[in-house]
Image (cartoon, rainbow, N blue to C red):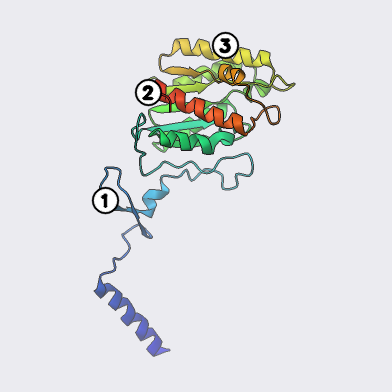
C-alpha cells in the first residue's frame, strides 16, 4: 500500500509542475465563457454562473411550469434590441409560446429571461417581480402576460387593485408591455369578463405613460386564432402570439417589425 500512496503524491506534484491551475478559492471549478464586452474569452467561476439561475425555482415543474429562469451571461446582438434585456412574466399562455417567443426576441437582438407558470394570476406575477428585484434581475423592459386566470378566481375590486399595484411595483422608470386578454367565450372565460379586464387595463394605461397595451385580443380575433381546449391556442395561434409580442416590443422601442 505504501508504494501506491507515494505514486499518488508524485502525480499530484507533477500536475503542479506542468502548470495546470488549481481551483480558485471559494469555487469548485472554472468555466470558460465569452465576455459581454466582445473580447475573446474569460474564465467565469461556477459560483458566478449559478447566480444567473433562480435557486428557488421548483425543480419539479411538471406540465404546468417553465424551466428555471436564466439571466443570460452573453447578450444578444442585432437590432432593434441591441442586446438589451427583457423580462417576460406570465401564465400558461407564455409557457405555450415560450420557445417561439424566445427565438424571435433573440433574432431581434433582445436578451430575454422568462418566468412563467400555468394557472397563475396577478399576485404570482407580483411575487416574480419582487424575486427578480432581489436577484438584481429586473431589466428596464418588462412584458406581462397575465389576467386570464384572474377572471375565474378573483373579485373585480381586488383585480383592479392588483393591476395598479403591479404597475407601481415595476416602477415608472421601466417600460411595461402588457398583453391584454383574449377569451374563447366558453363557460369559464367569457367575453364579458375579457372586455371588463381589458377595459380596466386601458384605464391603468391612461394613468401611466410607461405602460403600453399589446392589443392581443383585437389581433387574435381579427386573425381567427383558434383554441385547443377553450383556453390555450393551437400551434398557429401560439406562433402568432409570439410574433405579435415581439413586433410590439420592437415598435415600442423605436424599431420596426421583424
Answer with mark 3 or mark 2, whichever residue precedes in sequence: 3
Q: Give percent across and percent down for residue 243.
A: 50, 28
CB under 8 Å between callouts 3 and 1?
no
Q: CA distance from mark 1 to mark 2?
A: 30 Å
Q: Which residue is mark 1?
A: 40
Q: Give percent across and percent down for residue 138.
A: 41, 32
Q: Residue at x 50, y 34 (%)?
A: 101
**Element at badge 1?**
loop
Neighbor class of circle 3 (other Cα within 10 Å; few <14, some 14-19, many 20+) is few
Neighbor class of circle 1 (other Cα within 10 Å; few <14, some 14-19, many 20+) is few
Q: Which residue is mark 2?
A: 253
- Residue 256 shows in this picture: yes
**Element at badge 3?**
helix
Q: Give percent across and percent down for residue 180.
A: 55, 20
Q: Which residue is mark 3?
A: 199
**Element at badge 2?**
loop
Neighbor class of circle 2 (other Cα within 10 Å; few <14, some 14-19, many 20+) is few
Q: Residue at x 70, y 27 (%)?
A: 230
Question: In screen coordinates, is 82 left or right of 106?
Answer: left
Quadrant of the rendered image containing residue 15: bottom left
Question: In screen coordinates, is 128 left or right of 25?
Answer: right
Q: Give percent across and percent down for residue 209.
A: 41, 14
Q: CA distance from mark 3 to mark 1?
A: 51 Å
Q: Is residue 55 above or below residue 182?
A: below
Quadrant into which the C terminus falls: top left
Answer with mark 1 or mark 2, whichever residue precedes in sequence: 1
Amino acid at each position: 500500500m505504501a508504494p501506491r500512496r507515494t505514486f499518488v503524491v508524485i502525480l499530484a506534484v507533477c500536475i503542479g509542475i506542468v502548470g495546470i491551475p488549481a481551483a480558485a478559492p471559494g469555487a469548485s471549478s472554472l468555466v470558460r465563457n465569452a465576455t459581454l464586452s466582445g473580447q475573446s474569452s474569460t474564465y467565469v467561476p461556477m459560483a458566478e454562473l449559478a447566480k444567473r439561475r433562480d435557486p428557488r425555482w421548483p425543480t419539479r415543474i411538471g406540465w404546468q411550469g417553465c424551466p428555471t429562469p436564466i439571466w443570460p451571461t452573453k447578450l444578444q446582438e442585432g437590432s432593434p434590441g441591441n442586446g438589451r434585456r427583457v423580462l417576460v412574466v406570465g401564465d400558461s399562455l407564455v409557457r405555450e409560446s415560450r420557445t417561439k417567443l424566445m427565438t424571435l426576441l433573440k433574432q431581434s437582438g433582445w436578451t430575454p429571461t422568462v418566468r412563467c407558470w400555468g394557472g397563475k394570476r396577478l399576485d404570482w406575477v407580483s411575487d416574480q417581480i419582487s424575486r427578480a428585484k432581489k436577484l438584481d434581475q429586473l431589466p428596464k423592459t418588462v412584458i406581462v402576460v397575465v389576467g386570464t386566470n384572474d377572471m375565474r378566481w378573483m373579485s373585480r375590486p381586488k383585480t383592479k387593485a392588483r393591476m395598479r399595484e403591479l404597475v407601481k411595483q415595476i416602477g415608472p422608470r421601466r417600460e411595461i408591455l402588457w398583453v391584454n386578454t383574449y377569451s374563447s367565450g366558453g363557460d369559464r372565460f367569457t367575453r364579458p369578463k375579457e372586455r371588463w379586464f381589458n377595459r380596466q387595463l386601458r384605464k391603468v394605461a391612461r394613468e401611466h405613460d410607461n405602460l403600453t397595451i399589446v392589443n392581443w385580443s383585437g389581433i387574435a380575433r381579427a386573425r381567427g386564432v383558434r383554441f385547443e381546449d377553450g383556453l390555450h391556442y393551437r400551434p398557429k395561434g401560439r406562433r402568432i402570439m409570439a410574433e405579435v409580442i415581439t413586433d410590439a416590443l420592437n415598435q415600442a422601442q423605436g424599431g420596426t417589425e421583424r
